[in-house]
Image (spheres, rainbow, N blue to C red):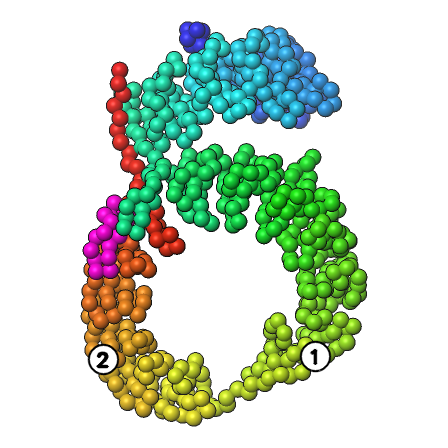
Amino acid sequence: MIRCVLILFFLTGCFSSLAIDYERFRENGKVGLKDKQGIIIIPASFDALGWSDGNFSVIGQITGYRQNNKWGLINLKKKFITKPDYNSLTWPGGDRIIISKFLNPYTIKFGALDLLGKLVIPFSYDAINIQGLHAIVMIKNGIHYEYGVVDLDDHSIIPVRYKKITSIGTLRYAVQNFYDKTALCNEQGKWITDFIIDEISDFHHNMAIITQGWRQGIIDRNGEIKIQPSFRAIHIISPEQLSVRKANEWKLLDINFKEIQKIEADDLYESNGLYHLSIGGKEGITDDQLQPQWPTEYNSVEILPYNQVILKKNGKSGLYRTNHTTILPIVFDSLCVQKNFVRCMQWINGKASWQVYDTFGIKKSRRTYEFVDRFNGKFFPVKIRGFFGAVDRYGEEKIACVYDSILEVNDSLVSVIFKKQYGIITIEDRWKVIPQKNPLKLLADNHYLEKQDTIVFLKDIKSNTIYFTDQSLQVFNDHLQETLADGTVKEINFLGKIISRKEPVIFRAEQIFRESEGYTGIKRDGKFGFVDSHGRLRIANRYEAIGEFHDGLAPIKLLGKWGYINAADQIMIQPTYESCGDFDNRIAQICRKGKKGLINAEGKELLELRYDSIKKISNQLFLLTLNSLKGLASSTGRMLIEPRFESLEVLENNQVVVSQNKQYGVLTTDGLSVLPISYSKIIYLPEKKMFLVEQKALWETLEMKE
């Protein structure tokens, strides 16, 4: 058999090599063929020469031609091998030509010719892929595609009844059934394995990687399993050597780091009291003790509150309870849960069909819709035939599907667009404001805003004008806030009454800052100072820059340096710093020569100025950064953990998660190790007072045994 394959490859090379001796030419809109000396072999009388996929070659003195949008075969002696009867004509290599033909106006089928034009594979298939001496063929059966293998004379090798067939190397096929299990078959149709494989790779060094679940192993060409599927990943290096990696291991530890449970997973995280598990591209669920609850076999898993879970498999979604009882089966193309309601969609004849269910699995909508939007507290906006309406929580269509859009809803009113105009209807679908060109916005208490050019009108539901303005307007739940050009702020209720009015504090200033401890910073005449709440100047504007008052002190800049003054305008800490921050709990951050430190309210240095950044974590702790490494200091300036870690996170129990070289561990706030720095991830679970830790598996070299 191998000798036959080599002969075929040799003949293929000979057949196709002749194509380089010929050149197509065009004349009067037609195509012909010349040899390399320019002698016309085939006159320019065809629409195209070569193959219908756009390629050109001469195979055994034969090529394809097109006339009247149909294809046939012709030889270099200008003899027609076949009539132009075919919709397509392609050469896959070897001595067979793949052809297609309409059997009736609605059905096109594929077959194959030999180089004499004889039909050797009949028009029985919906696709043909010739590989060597065999062809993988496909037939559409209802909504399914079924695959098989035939030889080049259409003798069955593997029956046409499988979901997928793939050539995985010389004389071997991976055959997948409709249960998504794969078996290995040879070129004679003999089964080498049972349907026990989920995936299989091509053969390398006469070995292939097989996958069962997420575990990988090694099989040889004779179907013997050389390495049982037990590894997360395998690379074939040579016939004698493999590179293997086990799965990552996750552990649940109590607050004293005692192991409670462990499990293998690519990723694991807590969600609504359970754990979302993923491995090998599949997802599942465990309980809070890492005991399996749902198998790791789904495309996606979404854990919801109230012991519910959305499961997705093979492109379909369903809703289940965590105790494995069914609410809605896995048949929907889209499934969205919102509190007590479920919006579901299925594609039916190429169109979206939406319905509403409750979380007990009871259908609420009376008919299907093109779209169902989220429940807005009153109803579900729905769409049918391109128009919008509304369905209430009981499935009743309360608002007819006649509107361009549904915009807003409040307790009893709905704003809509109808025939490109704005209007307001009741929940019962009665007009309250007939459609008009001006945009409308619903308010509470049967009021609305209408915008006409630059003017906004406040109106009641009878369209009576209550108030109007062309000033800036903000909408709140029970009032409007209008800001006038001079800074005056007015609050107006929906009856049009001004319920408050705040005039701006008027004094001459170029810039006004936020008030703090009764003092407001100002800039006047290019200098900075402070005024009190009545606008009276308390600290003369004589500084180059200022901060805010905190703990009785405010940063000021004088002669290019920063220091601090008190409320009596006395310099309490001399201006010697490049920058300084506000005091917080009588501690402030200062900077000199680009390095940060800490001082107290008396100006005493608590942390020397040598850090790249300092961040307050709590009243007692500060995060330090030096050369991109993290450390920890107390509010008294005591060094707790030297900056030597890539990351540092302080937990609520005065423990600290740190990392070095992408490995994680746990220290006390005093820097004592309580969990070695050997984990690839550490997650603290505060509600459970537990740790979820991950140890990534490393690649190892495995020697193959004879």
Figure check: 9 above or below 602: above
Q: Residue 344: which quarter of the image?
A: top right
**Amino acid found under the numbered disc labelled 2:** Gly
Residue drawn at x 37%, y 55% is 686
The residue nearer to you, when weighing 55 against 178, is 178
Q: Is residue 687 left or right of residue 334?
A: left
- Which SS class for mark 1? loop
Residue drawn at x 34%, y 41% is 261
Q: Main secondary structure of the magenta part?
A: strand
**Amino acid found under the numbered disc labelled 1:** Leu
Which corner quadrant holds the C terminus?
top left
The residue nearer to you, when weighing 99 against 390, is 390
Which residue is denoted by mark 1 in the rendering?
495
- Find the magenta span and give its range: 661-678
Which residue is denoted by mark 2 in the rendering?
603
The residue nearer to you, when weighing 501 against 260, is 260
Whether residue 10 is visible, yes or no, is: no
The reply to whether the magenta stretch includes residue 246 is: no
The image position of residue 602, as x and y in percent, is 23, 81
Which corner quadrant holds the N terminus?
top left
Count residues near mark 2 (Cα–Cα under 10 Å), then give few for <14, some for 14-19, many for 20+: some
The image position of residue 669, as x and y in percent, is 24, 60
